[in-house]
Amino acid sequence: MMLNDSEITLITCSGISNTGKLTAKVGEILIRRCPGQIEMCLPARAQPEKMLDALAHAEKILVVDGCSDCCGRKKLKEQGYDPDIHIIATECGIVKNGMEDPRFDEIELLTSVVREKIR
């Protein structure tokens, strides 16, 4: 799906595992690297009112989950929305390994995957 004509609201799972931390880092990077394309980035644990307001004004919704638990997508569905794009880090070659900090190569890999999906 090509999303280059729309501003994207990015929801990250932002959990406490390495893959959750990874999604938060990738969100921060994408806000800087894709000005005008990524409108905002919210963690899935954002207050429900803030999440609902962001989703109500979203042109396109991208969810980046760390693992197959899909916490970000679940939070989105609780608000009555489906993502336009859904990416799961562990399906992109990232290994979930507890509480480790994400490595630079993992951050760059997932950032590249997301950027490719939103071109």
Image (cartoon, grey):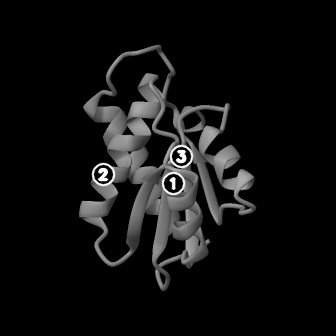
Where is residue 75 drawn, in percent x and y?
65, 47
Q: What residue is at 65 percent from the left and 38 percent from the top?
A: 70
Q: Residue at x 51, y 50 (%)?
A: 47
Q: Say left or right for 46 vs 102.
A: right
Outermost residue on the bottom side: it is: 5
Assign a secondary structure to mark 3: loop
SS state under label 2: helix
Position above or below: 65 against 10: above
Q: Earlier in the sequence, mark 1 or mark 3?
A: 1
- Residue drawn at (73%, 51%), measured in percent from left and top? 78
Q: Can residue 51 be seen by looking at this rendering?
A: yes
Picture quadrant where residue 101 is located: top left
Closer to viewer: mark 3 or mark 2: 3
Residue 28 numbered tag: 2
- Residue that badge 1 annotates: 11
From the image, which quarter does the N terminus lie in? Answer: bottom right
Q: CA distance from mark 1 to mark 3?
A: 6 Å
Residue 79 position (above or below residue 13) = below
Whether residue 37 is situated above or below residue 28 in the rendered picture: below
At x 47% / y 15%, what residue is drawn?
A: 97
- Marks 3 & 2, CB-CB < 8 Å contact: no
Q: Which residue is mark 3?
A: 44
> Which mark identifies residue 91?
none
Can you give x and y, in whole percent of width and height, for residue 73 in the image? 66, 48
Q: Earlier in the sequence, mark 3 or mark 2?
A: 2
Task: Give residue 77's position: percent from left, percent from top.
Answer: 73, 54
Say which label, 2 or 1, has the lower sequence index.
1
Nearer to the camera, 94 or 42: 42
The answer to whether residue 19 is left or right of residue 81 is left
Q: Residues within 10 Å of mark 1 (few under 14, many from 20)?
A: many
Point out the frontmost of discs 1 and 3.
Answer: 3
